Amino acid sequence: MSIIKLDQNTINHIAAGEVIDRPSSIVKELVENSIDANATNISIEIKDGGISFIRITDNGDGIEEDDIKIAFERHSTSKIKDTIDLASIHSLGFRGEALSSIAAVCQVELITKTKDSMTGFRYRIEGDEEIGFEEIGAPDGTTFVVRNIFFNTPARRKFLKTASTESGYISEIIEKIALSHPEISFTFINNGKTRIYTPGNGNLKDTIYAIYGKEVTDNLVEVNYKDKNIEMTGFLGKAIISKGNRSNENYFINGRYIKSDIISKAIEEGYKFILMQHKYPFTVVNFTIDNKYIDVNVHPSKMELRISNASEIYPAIVETVKETLIEKPNIIDAKIDDEKKEEKKIDRKPEPFETKRNVEEEIVPEKTRNIPKPKSADYTNIIKPKQEEVHEQLSYDFLSEEARPKHKIIGQVFETYWIVEYEDEMYIIDQHAAHEKVNFERLMKRFENNDVSTQMLSQPIILNLSMKDANVLEQYLDNFNEIGFQIEPFQGTDFAVRGVPSELYTIDSEDVLMDIIDNFTAEIGSMVPNIITEKICSMSCKAAIKGNTKISFAEADALIDELLSLDNPYNCPHGRPTIIKMSKEELEKKFKRIV
Ligand code: ADP
Ligand code: MG
């Protein structure tokens, strides 16, 4: 298809603005061009964060000789002709501005060859000035080499960050684009090292594996939904791989990587029942929405778009996410096969890629302390409106009210894990994680409902603190007292603890408080008050659960009961699993009863 210069009327309809502000925007524009050119292999190589060198090679359609110079003129494109085309855009690009903008601020070299041409061509342009045009031998496809961004506008160069930050932005863009196109193989090489390689075999899960590694891939639930307004395919991460920020919320509309508040909100709403506050899910979801409802011509970087049927698709997304997660509870399968055998074989390049760990692990210090014994009477006050609503929809019923009487508690092993049999599955519940979770939820519910309850101590505990620790405690005293501690300044840098939250009555308050204060000094500064309180809750609960303590069947029964009634029984507040399961089939395979 030949490249034309758009007429003024069409140009006037295109969202105006600068698209090249840093190396990552060059990478985004050029990779999008390669995708639009039907490439199945795209390799991106950078040096110095892309500031001095970017090379993008594709095996796509190439540019015809007569079109090469025109491609670098403003508003020249092969993707649309007029305002009518603008109304339904099927390609990633359409503005016809990227190449001219890049050439204006960089030194650019283009080598391209179409299948029908006998030879390739090399074109060089630096800061809008043509340097050379010649015929050369080249493989089918296109290579762009972009050197020295802002070489002619040093003032703009100053706004760039360090090479490692800039290469981080580039890596992120490539990850997202690769996830949105599993049928294309992407290679990203930074300073000579391969950082990303995706197989391009069309399998989204393999692409996720290549980028995020095994831990993430092992904790995904497939999503598949279609109605007249929207189609949704891809994967939702279980709660265990959620993060404290939105960087792993990947979603695409019609193959385009975008950011959309409405989509983020819908996904998070759907996840609400299994995620703690301030945790954000891992997702890779492709939305297909009829082009007539989508306007991508809103922002020059094409990262934002307008969705005109948002009110119809919003509830569908929320429900689909929720139902998908409910049907496949976030219980981890305890696979006992050799892990290596399980790893999916992906056709990889020899160099190792970087994988990311997304699970924040916190290790519970092994100190021995009493665990609060659950009293059956306590369980009657648990507020459950939300989970009832959730349970109603449970197709998987380990968690349902009806399933409850059929749970058979088999016993405890290693003074820590409770084994529960239910139908053809064996569930293993970590007593300590369960306690921690149950206590945390109780404390948080009480705090949220303004209903904290304090157990007064017969003898106050006096905390002797250093000046620094006393300052910290003084500063956050309200947060402690909000969840049921009763602490007040005593003498000098000493504090008197007169009461503790009823849920944590049996804890060794002095140790717990000292632990919390120790941990505080380092990280708490930038948090908002509610998060500080939540943090105190979670730290208190973690500290309250210790050691290999034996509890009775009745106590275990009550604990498991309460755990299973929670909105999210699957993880402790620190993200570790509380329940894992192993199927009868798995065991039978292991014993070679079945193959
Ligand atoms: P747009 O993508 O909006 O059309 P660009 O300035 O990014 O505008 O590119 C101008 C034109 O150059 C494209 O329309 C396309 O025809 C051609 N082009 C750019 N990159 C490639 C590529 N890698 N392979 C084939 N053609 C390309
Ligand atoms: Mg383009």
Image (spheres, helix red, strand yellow):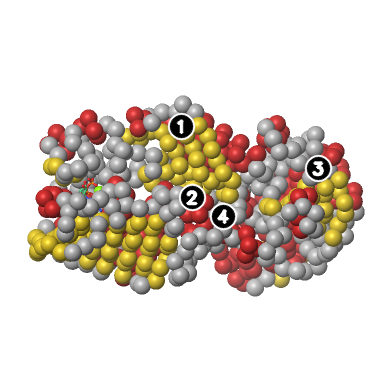
Q: Which residue is located at x 82 percent, y 49 percent?
A: 420
Say which element carries label 4.
helix
- The amino acid type, in three-letter code, at marker 1 is Ile
* Quarter placement of the N terminus: top left
Measuring from the top left, give residue 323's x and y in whole percent: 61, 36
Q: CA distance from mark 1 to mark 4?
A: 25 Å
Which one is closest to the eye, mark 2 or mark 4? 2
Query: Do the numbered discs 1 and 4 sit on residues whose CB atoms are within 8 Å?
Result: no
Say which element carries label 3.
loop
Q: CA distance from mark 2 to mark 4?
A: 12 Å
Sequence-earlier tag: 4 or 3: 4
Sequence-earlier tag: 2 or 1: 2
Q: CA distance from mark 3 to mark 2?
A: 33 Å
Q: Which residue is mark 4?
A: 217
Say which element carries label 1.
strand
Q: Which residue is mark 3?
A: 423
Q: Which residue is mark 1?
A: 230
Sequence-earlier tag: 3 or 1: 1
Q: Which residue is mark 2?
A: 203
Q: Is mark 1 within 8 Å of ligand 1?
A: no
Query: Do the numbered discs 2 and 4 sit on residues whose CB atoms are within 8 Å?
Result: no
Q: Which residue is located at x 48 percent, y 44 percent?
A: 285
Q: Does the image show residue 301?
A: no
Measuring from the top left, give residue 314's x and y in whole percent: 48, 32
